[in-house]
Amino acid sequence: MKGIYALVFLFFSSYSPVLAFPQMQVSDISGALPNEIVFIRSGLDHVNTVLQSDCFKNAVLASNFTENQNLSGAQIYALQNSKVTTVKVVMYTGSWWANHISHTIGDENEPSTVYMNRYYVKGAYMVGDNLIHEGEGHSLGFTHYHVKSTSEPYGMNAIYESCAPKVWLN
Ligand SMILES: [Zn+2]
């Protein structure tokens, strides 16, 4: 019996990231090819690794976003740290215009749904970059006027792009 308990403990302890915050989940994936489902799932792992890193925490604490809902960096981190954010992912094939003229990587015309253009989103890193903008930005009530790099949602992209290489190399 003792052995079984030990195994059960190991099983749950290997899933400890589920209890770590901030955390994102993907509740539904549609329109994706089998290989895309694989890299969407690993993109989710990547984003959670970044979210739970000191690099992410320190960057949010030190942040000074423009569209910040009047929250300080510490208040934004506390909000992110208080809940699991859940998004849906839809993969689609972009139009010629979207792929070559407007360079539309994704769309966000529905709350908590991330539309990803497969012409640009070809791997886990890009998936993570899209997920963090929606999950730790818009899902928590943050907005931006067009592509505004100083807003909270685009700030999430900048932090992800800065932290991801450091977190994965360590
Ligand atoms: Zn946005």
Image (cartoon, rainbow, N blue to C red):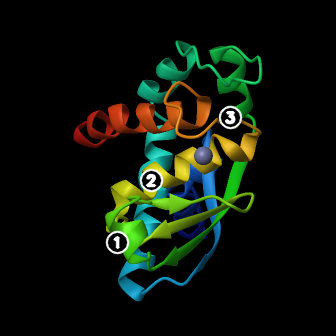
Residue 164 at x, y percent in the picture:
34, 40
Residue 19's disc is none
Above or below, 58 against 7 in this view is: above
- For disc 3, the marked residue is 80
Above or below, 161 against 97 in this view is: above
Residue type at mark 1: give it.
Tyr
Numbered disc 1: secondary structure: loop
Few, some or many C-alpha atoms within 10 Å of disc 2 (few <14, some 14-19, many ≥20)?
A: many
Q: Counting residues from the N terminus, which is met first, the one under dot 3 or under dot 2?
A: 3
Above or below, 84 against 111 in this view is: above
Few, some or many C-alpha atoms within 10 Å of disc 1 (few <14, some 14-19, many ≥20)?
A: some
Do tag 1 and tag 2 residues touch (Cβ < 8 Å)?
no
Numbered disc 2: secondary structure: helix
Which of the pair 3/133 is nearer the observer? 133
Q: Tell me: 54 left or right of 21.
A: left
Q: How far apart are marks 3 and 2 (CA)?
A: 16 Å
Quadrant location of residue 78?
A: top right
Residue type at mark 2: give it.
Gly
Q: Tell me: 137 left or right of 38.
A: right
- For disc 1, the marked residue is 119
Do tag 1 and tag 3 residues touch (Cβ < 8 Å)?
no
- For disc 2, the marked residue is 128
Residue at the image position 47 percent from the left and 29 percent from the top? 56
Q: Tell me: 82 left or right of 166.
A: right
Residue at the image position 43 percent from the left and 77 percent from the top? 95
Residue at the image position 67 percent from the left and 25 percent from the top? 67
Q: Counting residues from the N terminus, which is met first, the one under dot 1 or under dot 2?
A: 1
Q: How far apart are marks 1 and 2 (CA)?
A: 16 Å
Q: Tell me: 53 left or right of 86.
A: left
